[in-house]
């Protein structure tokens, strides 16, 4: 069978992906799709088997984990994977039939980087792989995928994380791209920061008005309707808006953009794609000390 034609295919060729699913038909279907874009596949039919396999195979580039499994379900599986020595840096992609705000929160709490809905759409799955897998082998064709989802460098080792000083704080993420919300929220949760999210500027303003105890808000600039500039201006007009640090996230990182963000009320900004070390540095500058331990 010829390789599957898709923009992400050339990016991910040569990578190693684990698929964890108790449904043998789903396991075969997803494995076949991944092999058609020249991805090496490791398969596990149970959550515990997936955890053991990841422990034995630390060079896995990404894991796809089904949520609804008997025994150790997807949430437990991903938490156990995150506890492994390599689990801090590997992207974990959940796939679930329950795609709603509550499910997203449960997935984030389990350590998910992103999720795809069931039944799995092939194009969406390949897009997610293109966002989260590192560039493929040197023999692969040049990448053409141009998603705006954020890119993170691997996290620093756990002993260098800021969880001990940021734990117990609350941050808001305002972004119309659900993948970006997942990425930023996952990093914040791994720093023991509680996360609230909004997918529109208007929702972010309303959420801040209802939740004045928020310690910091991260606001994407390029949003439909009320963009990031308007969102931050509206937030600054709220009773709590004068004290909350507003961090703009923008792909236009130049002196002119910096001034536009400051004029809109931003305390600082981080360019996209987001660099983890810089992001953590900004959090350390603007978040107050959290609860001890």
Image (tube, rainbow, N blue to C red):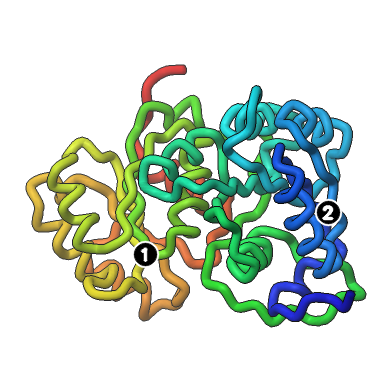
Q: Left or right: where does residue 75 sit relative to residue 32?
A: left
Residue 164 rendering spot, x and y as whole percentages: 49, 25
Report whether residue 248 is seen: no
Above or below 159: residue 174: below
Please name whichever residue, 16 or 160, is drawn nearer the observer in this view of the structure.
Answer: 16
Q: Left or right: where does residue 48 sit relative to residue 200?
A: right
Going by the picture, which residue comes out furthest to the top? 293
Above or below 110: residue 235: below
Q: Residue placed at 58% from the left, 66% from the top?
A: 124
Q: Quadrant of the N terminus?
A: bottom right
Q: Residue placed at 69% from the left, 79% from the top?
A: 7
Above or below 253: residue 19: above
Q: Left or right: where does residue 159 sit relative to residue 148?
A: right
Q: Residue placed at 71% from the left, 59% from the top?
A: 133
Q: Left or right: where does residue 169 sit relative to residue 98?
A: left
Q: Which residue position is annotated with label 1?
A: 176
Above or below 36: residue 185: above
Q: Which residue position is annotated with label 2?
A: 16
């Amino acid at each position: 069978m010829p390789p599957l034609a898709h923009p992400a295919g050339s990016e991910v060729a040569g990578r190693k992906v684990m698929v964890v699913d108790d449904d043998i038909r789903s396991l075969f279907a997803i494995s076949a799709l991944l092999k058609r874009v020249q991805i090496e596949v490791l398969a596990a039919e149970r959550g515990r088997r997936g955890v053991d396999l990841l422990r034995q195979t630390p060079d896995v580039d990404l894991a796809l984990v089904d949520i609804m499994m008997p025994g150790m379900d997807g949430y437990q599986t991903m938490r156990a994977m995150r506890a492994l020595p390599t689990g801090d840096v590997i992207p974990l992609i959940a796939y679930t039939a329950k795609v709603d705000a509550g499910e997203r929160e449960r997935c984030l709490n389990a350590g998910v980087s992103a999720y795809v809905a069931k039944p799995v759409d092939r194009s969406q799955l390949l897009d997610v792989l293109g966002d989260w897998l590192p560039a493929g082998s040197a023999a692969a064709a040049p990448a053409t995928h141009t998603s705006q989802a954020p890119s993170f460098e691997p996290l620093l080792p756990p002993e260098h994380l800021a969880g001990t000083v940021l734990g117990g704080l609350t941050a808001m993420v305002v972004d119309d791209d659900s993948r970006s919300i997942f990425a930023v929220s996952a990093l914040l949760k791994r720093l023991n920061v509680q996360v609230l999210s909004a997918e529109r500027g208007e929702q972010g303003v309303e959420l801040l008005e209802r939740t004045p105890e928020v310690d910091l808000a991260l606001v994407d600039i390029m949003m439909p309707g009320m963009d990031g500039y308007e969102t931050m201006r509206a937030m600054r007009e709220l009773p709590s808006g004068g004290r909350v640090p507003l961090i703009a996230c923008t792909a236009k990182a130049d002196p002119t953009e910096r001034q536009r963000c400051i004029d809109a009320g931003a305390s600082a900004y981080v360019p996209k794609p987001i660099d983890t070390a810089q992001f953590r540095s900004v959090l350390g500058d603007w978040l107050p000390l959290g609860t001890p331990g």
